[in-house]
Structures are given as structure tokens and as C-alpha cells.
Amino acid sequence: MPLPPDFHFSQSSLKDYFDCPRRFELRHLQKVKWPAPLSEPILEQERHIMLGEQFHHLLHQLFIGIPPDLLTSSLRSKELREWWDAFNRSGLLDTLPQNRHPEKMISASWERYRFLAKLDLLAGSPGQRWVIVDWKTSTHRPPSKLLKNDIQSRLYPFLLVQAGNSLNNGEPLLPDQVEMIYWFANFPGQIEEIHYSQEKYQKDREDFTKLAREISGIPAGRFLMTDDERKCRFCNYRSLCNRGDTAGDWRELEEEALEIGNGEGFHDIDFDQIGEIAF
Ligand code: SF4
């Protein structure tokens, strides 16, 4: 189906597509609101999400110049204080380029497709190294192999190169200038660094183009439901799809994510599954 004129691909919409094409259609094309919990127990899940958001906000405040002492004195929860202390002890800041842009939006268009990403932090200067940093507050640290093939690890560096001219004094930003870092609040010593390259960039451009063509070529109502019903346990459309009415336990969500590629940003994708669409 032709994508709506204001449609843009993002890591979350692509993850939904890989998890379940029907979920992609319901959430991102039809924009169906379906009030159901993603997981249980709701209060615990909401607290976990809220703490993650507060930690992202805390670091945003730091990078826009609020004094660290003031931020420290504002912390009310034990988890936040532990994550904040771990961040300050980690020495990560010493390794990053000085020019830093928190919560940076980048977008790129080619053919008739538009892609968007919101980076937790982008650090770099024209002609130098550019580092994308992503903060994770998950309770599990995914294996490096899974992270390297995660859709986020491919999409963000790719879009930075695609859109990088404006950041790089009008000069193309080269893939070799780009790297991505995952910093884990619960595993501060286990940073993941992923270096980008011309070879990866070319492969990503081919794969994302192929994927966008595939999705835009599916007629309305023909987006298939996943065969893997484990994914339905953490999907708010369960009752709409007749896939049960009980949410899974959120504590299992990240464990499941490591196995089935759902959850907070970890998604082992197999682009080879994408069929060629003839135009
Ligand atoms: S409930 Fe299952 S089949 Fe329905 S949209 Fe969600 S993941 Fe897909």
C-alpha cells in the first residue's frame, strides 16, 4: 500500500515490522489505539519505564549544562542514584568528543522513503570522529553479537552518514568517522563500541531500501500476523487479534528479547528474509 504522505520509518516501527507485520500495520499505518497492558505487573512495569525515562532526562539535563551537583541533589530514587553514580565513575565522558548534542533528531530521505532517528547523544566535530551514544537501563546486558546486528546499531550510524553533510560543514560524513556506543546503567563496565565502515554503509543502504520497498508494496489488510505467539504476550493488540487476553510478565520481557528479538532495543534482524519486490 502507498505509505501515508507523513509516514517515516524509525527503529521502533521497523522492529515492530520484524516482530509482526500486522502490529506494524495496526500501530504505524492505521494508528489503532488499543488499551491493554504490554506486560504485567503494570505498576512494576510502569516504574521500570519511568525510571528509564528519568535517567535519560537526567543525562539530557547534564548535557545542556545543568551543574552536576544540582542534578545529584535532585535525585530521589535509589536506582537513579546508583545509575548516576555509576555514570560519573565510568569515565565515559573523558572518551567522547567535546562537541555534544543531546537528544539529537536526524532524518534522511531517498527514493520516496523518509527515515527518522532520535539519538540519545551525538558527540563530534566536522572532519573528526562522530560518536552516537545510547543509554540503556535494561536489566539484562545483551550479547555483543546480538547488539552488533541490532536494527538500531545499523539504522543510527547509517542515517548519520546519510544526513551528515549539515553537521560536517557541508562535506560528506564518511562511515569510517562514525561509531556507536551503548552504555548500560546496570552494567557500567560493559560498554559496547561498534565501529561503522563503508562496507557496512553500503550493505545497510541496500537492506533498508529493500525493506522500505517491501513494506510499501504490501496491500492494506495483507500485513500478516506473526507465527510466533510468544510475541503476542507483550503486544497490546492481543485481544484484537484473538491471541489471548493475559499480558506476559515484564521481568521475562528482556529475557525473551534476547531470544526472540523484542523489547528494549535489541533485535537480531535477518535482512536476508526480505524478498525482492519488482517495480
Ligand atoms: S497480538 Fe500478536 S499477531 Fe496481533 S499484532 Fe500483536 S504480535 Fe501481531
Image (tube, helix red, strand yellow):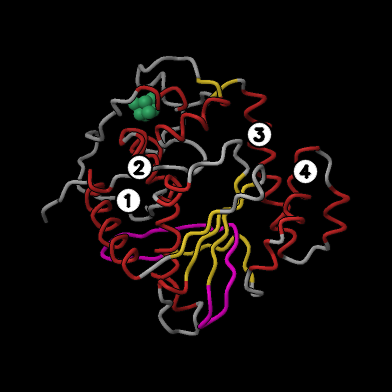
Residue type highlighted by circle 4? Glu
| 119 lies above or below 125 | above
Badges 2 and 1: C-beta atoms under 8 Å apart?
yes
Identify the residue position indicated by label 3 in the image: 48
Residue at the image point whose x is 58% and y is 26% from the top: 251
Q: Residues within 10 Å of mark 2 (few under 14, many from 20)?
A: some
Residue type highlighted by circle 3? His
* Residue 18: percent from left, percent from top: 33, 40
Residue type highlighted by circle 2? Leu
Q: Quadrant of the N terminus?
A: top left
Q: Quadrant of the C terminus?
A: bottom left
| 220 lies above or below 195 | above
117 falls in the magenta region:
yes
Nearest to N terminus: mark 4 or mark 3: 3
Nearest to N terminus: mark 3 or mark 2: 2
Residue at the image point whose x is 85% and y is 52% from the top: 72
Name the element at disc 2: helix
> In the rendered structure, which segment of residues is drawn in magenta?
108-129
Q: Ligand 1 within 8 A of label 4's CB?
A: no
Mark-to-mark CA distance, 1 and 3: 34 Å
Residue at the image point whose x is 42% and y is 47% from the top: 145
Snapshot quadrant of residue 157: bottom left
- Depth check: give the residue in front, 260 or 119: 260
Name the element at disc 1: loop
Number of marks: 4
Residue type highlighted by circle 1? Pro
In the displayed image of the protein, which residue is found farthest to the left? 278
